[in-house]
Image (tube, coloured by chain):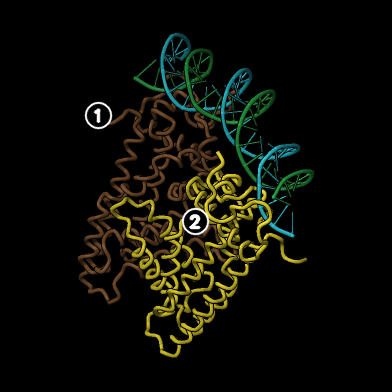
Chain colours: A brown, B yellow, C cyan, D green
Amino acid sequence: MAGVVESRTRRVGRPPQDASQRLARAHHILDIAGDLILRWGYDKTTVEDIARRAGVAKGTIYLHWKTREELFAALLRRERVEMIIEVRRRIREGPATLRELLRLLASETLSRPLIRASVLGDSEVLGRLTRQKRDRTAGAELDAGFRGYFDTLLEHGALRSDLSSAEHVTTLASVLYGFLSVSPMMPAGYRPADERLAELIADTVGRALEPGGPTPAADARAVARATLEYVDAVVEAARRKLRVSLGSEESTP
Amino acid sequence: MAGVVESRTRRVGRPPQDASQRLARAHHILDIAGDLILRWGYDKTTVEDIARRAGVAKGTIYLHWKTREELFAALLRRERVEMIIEVRRRIREGPATLRELLRLLASETLSRPLIRASVLGDSEVLGRLTRQKRDRTAGAELDAGFRGYFDTLLEHGALRSDLSSAEHVTTLASVLYGFLSVSPMMPAGYRPADERLAELIADTVGRALEPGGPTPAADARAVARATLEYVDAVVEAARRKLRVSLGSEESTP
DNA sequence: AAATGACCAGATAAACCCATACGGTCAAAT
DNA sequence: ATTTGACCGTATGGGTTTATCTGGTCATTT
């Protein structure tokens, strides 16, 4: 019966209450949860499954998160942090433009099933989570500094001035969402590879939102700085949310 | 109980078997069906409801269509015909370009709830119809001449030659689908009006697919002619399908 | 010949029950 | 102090029965 425990936490009773051990265990649990949700979907993944496979008791999971939902929230947040950190890493390898930022965001989204499912509201994976929240998630999420970033782009001529701010946002969201949604529905022969798809997305948004003329070098530098700063801010915000999600007890009142 | 009959078909028994009367009745039934499906959705709209409101007996409906599903197919096809005819009418008022064709398609789609629901696979309206077909619908539908039309555009420099045909199609479909899907999810303040949305769609696709330079007048004329011909062909194809859907008995074997 | 509406069988929904599974708790173990 | 897993109440899904509905037919009416 009692399954073979994997690596850590073999001893029962009172192992170290070491903070870093604790964090490692949380991550281990999330690893397992991520595996299971991708294999079986949210609805069919039970807390006990996760506990058993992670080699901990069910109660232990509740030492980390108050509810099952919070566990999955933490999982998604961790995934988001990893993604945006990877975006930050890669954007330093090339020009820090809106186009490039979008290409990387698309590329990283495409390679992360959980993020993709979350963006698309894939009920196959997210089960009943689909019919909840979902409204502010995409909207309010990026608003931390997003507005300011776009304003900066506008000031430096990196965005068409004949479109309203709402139109910029609508276009960006629509193109991204559209490509992500449509490409899996295309007949196999018509479906571009993921990396190519990311290029198409970035190119389409770039052509739609950028003004025609050449960009003065000074503006280009300012845009690059703003882009890097914005990515940093997003990383930081995502990390803050994740940190709360990983420390069982809620923030100090 | 027995509702007041509306206009036609008051007498019972054996009214004229006039072909045009017959067609008018079919259209009247479809009018009613369209009303009901929009109000209650496909699942909850029954044949008897339609019959009662249309002022005919249920059996009469089966004199026109073999099954309930065929009735709704006819409804959608009629809607599609009306739409594309309206597009054809409007495109004669301005330049017959890909951009303009797209703007009109988007505009007419946005103003037709049934078409919109069909394109988006809205299960609120289409009910269990959503979980069927749906694959070839969008794809194979336009293929009558669509490939040829795009080839012509390419020949006359109206499409970027550095994108593959699959990429042209993917981009077009993604942008259209994306805007149609995303705009209803946007917070009210961010949602552009329908006409503006159609412009954004056309503009985004145009910028994504058209090459930069100016178009020689000869090419522009060729493109206009091809566009009008393509629209005519689509109208004709849609009409042919509708005609079959409206004449109760199936095509001669 | 054309239209009708009562009629039928099968689909669908409602009501119900039951066994199990599940999220979450907590006294006990260490 | 920390972890455990038996335990609890409820949610959930399966199974069954019953009742209603609904797509489709066809003998009858005009």
Q: Residue at x 47, y 83 (%)?
A: B223
Decide if residue B28 is on the left or right side of residue B220.
right
**Disc 1 element:** loop
Q: Residues within 10 Å of mark 1 (few under 14, many from 20)?
A: few
Image vertical order of residue A106 relative to residue A50, above or below = below
Tell me the quarter of the picture where residue B3 sits.
top right
Q: Is residue B67 visible?
A: no
**Which label number is shown at residue A252?**
1
Quadrant location of the C terminus of chain B? bottom right
Q: Whole-percent x and y of residue B64?
A: 66, 57
Work out whether residue A29 or residue A252 is closer to the camera in this orientation and state it: A252
Work out whether residue B44 or residue B129 is closer to the camera in this orientation and state it: B44
**Disc 2 element:** helix
Residue type (three-letter) at the residue carrying disc 2 = Leu
**Which label number is shown at residue B114?**
2
Work out whether residue B30 or residue D1 is closer to the camera in this orientation and state it: B30
